[in-house]
Image (cartoon, coloured by chain):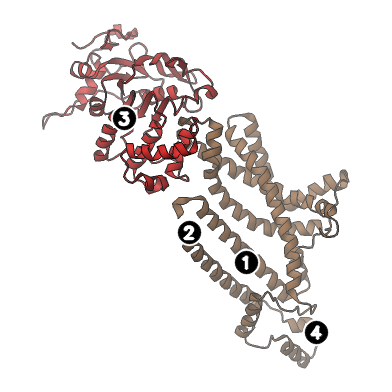
Amino acid sequence: MLSVEGLTVRADATDLVHDVSFAIAPGERVGLIGESGSGKSLTALSLMGLLPEGVTAAGRARLGERDLVGVPESRIKGLRGDELSMVFQEPMTALNPLMRIGAQVTEVMTLHGRSRQEARARSAELLERVRLPEPAQIARAYPHQLSGGQRQRVMLAIALANEPRLLICDEPTTALDVTVQKQMLELIAEVAPALLFITHDLAVVASVCERVLVMYGGRVVESGPIREVFTRPRHRYTQGLLAASKLTPRGTRLPVIEGGVPAAGRFPGGCVFRNRCPHATPECETPPALTGDGHAFACWHPAD
Amino acid sequence: MILYLLKRLAVLLASTAVAAVAVFAFMAVLPGDPAEIALGVNATPDAVAELRKQFGTDRPAVAQFLDWAGGLLQGDFGTSYVTSSPIGPQIGDRLGVTLVLVLGGMVVALVLAVPLGTFAAVRHRDPLGAAISAASQLGIAIPAFLAGILLVFVFAVQAQALPSGGYVPIAESPGEWLRSLLLPWLSLGLVQGAVLTRYVRSAVLDVMREDYLRTARAKGRGSTGALWRHGLRNASIPVVTVLGLQLATLLIGAVVVERVFVIPGLGDLLLNGVAGRDLLLVQGVVMVLVAAVLLINFVVDVTYHLLDPRLR
């Protein structure tokens, strides 16, 4: 349903996302994980055509038969909020402070051709579906009268309003309290048609998604079914990431990945991870390809 | 909202009352006795005392103030010690002229600033957007009276298209009235418009970076549609603040521009009053100007509440 081939995102001459390819089948829930600066959000924003000024995308991305990348805004905006929608990281600022919640929910429906009346009736249903208490009261409220978790539910209601084919969530629970996080995740897993879920939290990915893409330095370095990737990581970066997230016995030092994520454009040539990788050899100066069926990885010296 | 309105109204009334005390007290401590001024240097002390009694200026200050303030409540500004004519009607006539001048100048400023500022923000990476910013910077550097003189030079002296000064009441000839006000409006409005353009630009730029604009685009609006529907009202909040301050500035700026264009407004009346040592007239005009500024602030605050639900 969604197919991405050779997606590259560029600011000036710097590649921020390089040659990313993946696909999402109808109903499939895919996680996109990696540290900050690995290019996860840019990948998602380029699919929505919402890249910041001065950042451009190239390559191919199609939702069904429609191109998403390299088309003018006038052609892609009909898809946004209709067949493809997105929930952002920061619920506190994502809603217009001067507009009632109800109006902000109905807007996305009237924009895509529903009548005002129908949209209003449906917005009450939607608010109920995302488990907001007293939907009628919420619809009359302004964003500042709601909590962060409630606002994120409103964002989810807006995203689901036109029954999109694909929902993109960019760290939707990062800004929320832990207790609210869990409810929100369950809700997303329940209502999402097909899902691209961006997070840096491995536990979250494991609870929501079936398949995972691991990004580092603007590239997908490993991909496959969650269970396989998490129990038997092949790429050395994934291995490090998983080791760093495990609870360790008291008294031992926390395992870390040595070094830090370089600034954009400062990644080494060849394998982007080789300057932090304990297994790097001169061979790693040649970029490894993402190979393997089902469980794929881009590494010259994979773990077994 | 109603409760806020009542509260704010109470504040307006209280501050106007305080302002009245301040204006009266300030005029009272100024040296110069109306009776002495009226009679000249050769007056006998008896004649002066007699006239003081007639004016009522021999009474205690508090009694004089209550008399004056009580009159104000009924729209009576007292009778001039110099011309013996009632002050209220004069102020009324002149106030109308000044209001037309100030509001016209504001309209010119808004008509310039809102489209230009928004355009400069949307195209802030283009040379054209930068050119608008630069031009507005230049406009800020020019005081209104200089703009007035330049406009007179170009349109009245060189092109001979508009009168260089004078005022024709609208009842006499609407066409001439308009012609007589065009240059004053422009000289007030161009400068204020330049200032306002910069504020509009920065307000729109700030709003363009907001997450909710991205949300609007994620819903399926184009970037222009998102800015129109979600951006402009948000951007108007800081602009209203500046607008209120500017209205107050314009009111003062009008005093000077009325001089340049020989327009019989409040500013002209004030300067005449000062020149003729007509203390009660000056007191009345200053009171009206102060009250107008307080009223503008009131309107700005109420507008905030209408615009921004977070304040309610």
Image position of A2 (left or right of B134): left
Label 1's element? helix
The amino acid beneath tag 3 is Val
User: In the rendering, which numbered label is found on residue B291?
Assistant: 1
Image position of A82 (left or right of B9): left
Q: Chain of mark 2?
A: B
**Which percent across, then down, holds residue B192?**
67, 49
**What residue would you read off at disc 2?**
B1
**Which percent across, then down, holds residue B136?**
66, 41
Q: In the picture shown, does residue B298 fall above or below B61?
A: above
The amino acid beneath tag 1 is Ala
Separation of disc 1 and disc 3 at Cα? 59 Å
Label 2's element? loop
User: In the rendering, which numbered label is found on residue A207?
Assistant: none
**What residue would you read off at disc 4?**
B39
Chain given the colour brown: B
Q: How many marks?
A: 4
**What residue would you read off at disc 3?**
A191
